Amino acid sequence: MALARLGQSLARLLHRPLYLPPTSPPPLKDYHASVVRSFAPTHTGACLRGFASLTYNASSMIAHKLGGPLPVHIVNVPVLDLVIHLDHTRLMSTAAASKPNSPSAGARRVNLKIVMTSPGFIYEPYSPRERIPFWKRWFTLSGWRRTKEDIISEMKNAYAVSRLRKKTGYTKKQFYGEALNIYKEVNTLMAHGDTSALRKILTDRMHSTIKNELKRRQSKWSSVHWELVKPAVSIRTLRARMIGLDKKDLDKGFVQLTLEFVTKQKFEAYNSKGDVVSGDKSKEVLVKDIWVFERSLFHPGAYWRVCGRITL
């Protein structure tokens, strides 16, 4: 009888389904997941689309009403966007796998903060607007759209200048004098071919562009003479824009001002033998340039730098 009961017990055990624990890896810890997301490959096209889809969206912006309690975009508040936001600063952390509250396990946490010194692009580059007649502006649907776009552009200008004035004490007269000195210094250093000194007053992308231009120029001319005849004929602001980095901190961003310079200049180029091959330094030439100046609102000791030029 005992042998019979033992045989029945073995038979029941053999007929039970075999249980195996799941073979999928355990979920990543928070710090591991953050590292994986931080180093995930990102394509340039996807990055640019990310810029447009954050807060500044032209199609959705036009659909908003011009009125609103705040001049910038706040989450869940349908008001006008006057500043584009870039979420490029990221806090990355890594830690060794160890038991919690175990000092002998050698736990280590490393914080790496990425600081942006320049957005690296011109936000909404200036282009002249075609004039439209009064009747078309006020009595056609396309004219109403154009009027709304013009009002939004002026509101963006006013908002960027107001933030700049609040954070830096900006005045137009002082800035125009500083911008003209930078304009003269950049052109003088370019004439001398001094790329190392140019690095301080240009953004990285603009510095790379100027270096390539100087290489092409040096292949044609051995040296050049450039001179600015002061005062400038005219200086005017064409556009002001703000690029934000944090929706929760409106002062953490960059301001870009587009200026038009109309000046008188003297230019002369020489070959390797010292012969004049272009220009005449005895004659004054009227020149119009459009440059974009950029300044950080949150970096200590920030100053104006040239981030681009616009050719119409």
Image (tube, rainbow, N blue to C red):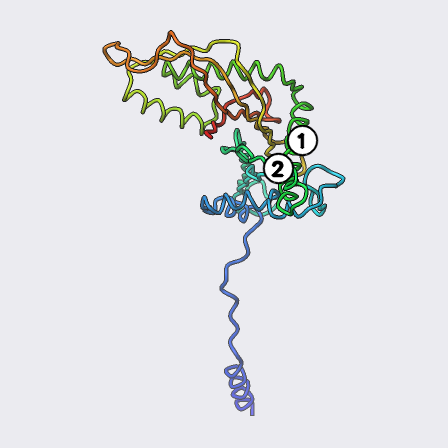
Instruction: Name above or below for residue 15 compared with residue 148.
Output: below
User: At x 56% / y 89%, what residue is drawn?
Assistant: 5
- Quarter of the image with the N terminus in it: bottom right
Lateral position of residue 271 relative to residue 254, left or right:
left
Picture coordinates of residue 145 (x, y %)? 63, 44
User: At x 54% / y 37%, what residue is drawn?
Assistant: 110
Picture coordinates of residue 60 (x, y %)? 63, 48
Instruction: Name above or below for residue 270 compared with residue 215.
Output: above
Residue 192 or residue 267, whichever sits in front: 267
Instruction: Name above or below for residue 219 compared with residue 105.
Output: above
Q: Quadrant of residue 228?
A: top left
Return the disc, 1 or 2, that comes first in the chain's sequence. 2
Q: Secondary structure at mark 1?
A: helix
Q: Which residue is mark 2?
A: 133
How far apart in space, not on screen, are marks 1 and 2 (Cα)?
Answer: 28 Å
Q: Which amino acid type is marked by label 2?
A: Pro
Picture coordinates of residue 2 (x, y %)? 56, 89
Q: Nearer the viewer, mark 1 or mark 2?
A: 2
Residue 299 or residue 235, whichever sits in front: 235
Q: Secondary structure at mark 2?
A: loop
* Badge 2: residue crowd in 10 Å (few <14, some 14–19, many ≥20): few
Q: Which amino acid type is marked by label 1?
A: Tyr
Q: Which residue is mark 1?
A: 159
